[in-house]
Amino acid sequence: MRKWEKQQQLRRGLKERHIGLIALGGSVGVGLFLGSASAIQIAGPSLLISYFIGGIVVFYLLRALGEVAVAYPVAGSFSAHAHTYIGPLAGYLTGWTYWFMWVVTGMAEITAIGIYVHYWLPALPQWIPALLAVIIMAGANLAAVAIYGEFEFWFALIKVIAIVALILGGLAMILFGIGNSGIPVGISNLWLYGGFFPQGATGTITALVMVLFSYVGIEVVGITAGEAKDPAKTLPAAIDKVFWRIILFYIGSLYVIMSICPWSDIAKAGSPFVSIFEKLGIANAAGIMNFVVLSAALSSCNSGIFSTGRMLYTLAVQGEAPAFLGRLNKNQVPVYAVLVSAACLLAGVVLNYIVPAKVFVYVTSIGTFACLWVWAVIFIIQLIFRRNLSPAETNKLVYPMPGYPFSGILCLLMLLLVAVIMSQDTDTRLALVIGPLWLLGLLACYYGRARCRF
């Protein structure tokens, strides 16, 4: 028997600080630093309400995920739980869909890495930093899981420092006029330009699509359950802290940005973060933010390889992916699952250059659909899990989801509302067409796999 065959359990090497920053890093990224300007144009200052509503959904999502993950902390998290509580088909569809979501996300991020490095090294071909990023991140993921945790901890910390600096510097400008010739800016910009709801309630509701997708990645905290030290203690602590930090960072930073700058002018200025840092007199603000978004892209690539590797490992253990993907190396890391996922990311570099733009849009639309699918499955898992517990077992839950069953049902309805909103826009409607086609393809593979049994 080979050495890897004796080590069928992933090593529990992730500490609470790792898990907390992994979840934070997964959900706070380039979308906030660069993409927030477009969300502001849709809703204006009322975007704060959109983020608050989205934050409530995320709170219950984390609690639903946490309740089951703490009770059964396994690798693959919601894919393994879907396999157990809904059925093997649900686990299969969820695992492969989530895997594909992160692969697509990683493809986009490593392409962006080449662009960000080009800011400093314009003569360097973009594919070189993209290739190096995948090699380094794959190496970190092939080492002990604690090494991955350290990488993600420091990547996330860079983003946290940038956001805290923006909030504190912005508040200094709002209250004391620092960076504005000593004249306090105040918060009147929140209602002077068309009111707090300049685009009406429709804008606030429409922005929910972008808001919820900006939180995508927070569910990666569930993937860490199989490798967390003392999951009954570390997971609840990490989840509780992450939720409040994310609400503070998103709402706090957007509150400061829209108080200082009229919402209608933000899109013209590029990154809102760069604008605020320049107003505060910080030299080379654009260069600093380029470094921050580079670290955000590296963080996403790192999390993507981790998540996809663990998901392939879980699918292999469940007999729903080739068996070799379930093999572990001496560090008890799913080596082949990580390498296959990293190779798919490298393929993304090539695809970005050789396939027509439309094809890549179709592929990324599956990633958009995957978010709604996975989040809905997480809520359904919790509802079924709790329904199957006796009163005595319910009382023994370490981390119960509050408001059961109404909280989960209301959040499912909110996800349905987001799907309806997506169907009204030509840019997002595609996800609701391509996504079901992706599921039909998986169904064909699921029922046809008996002919080529894994």
Image (spheres, grey):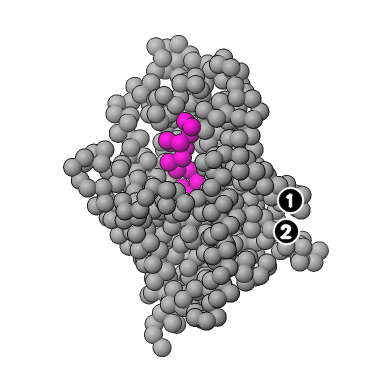
Q: Residue at x 39, y 67 (%)?
A: 340
Q: 185 or 411: which is nearer to us?
A: 411
Q: Residue at x 71, y 51 (%)?
A: 408
Q: Element at badge 2?
A: helix
Image-quadrant location for residue 422: top right
Q: Are marks 1 and 2 in contact (CB under 8 Å)?
A: yes
Q: Residue furthest left?
A: 123
- What is the tally of numbered marks visible in this picture? 2
Q: Is residue 202 above or below residue 120?
A: above
Is residue 126 something one can see in this rendering? Answer: yes
- For the magenta stretch, what is the residue range? 21-38
Instruction: State the image coordinates of residue 273 (x, y, percent, origin top left).
Output: 41, 30
Kindly identify which residue carries mark 2.
383
Instruction: State the image coordinates of residue 271 (x, y, percent, origin top left).
Output: 40, 31
Judge left or right: residue 403 versus residue 254: right
Instruction: State the image coordinates of residue 60 (x, y, percent, origin top left).
Output: 66, 48
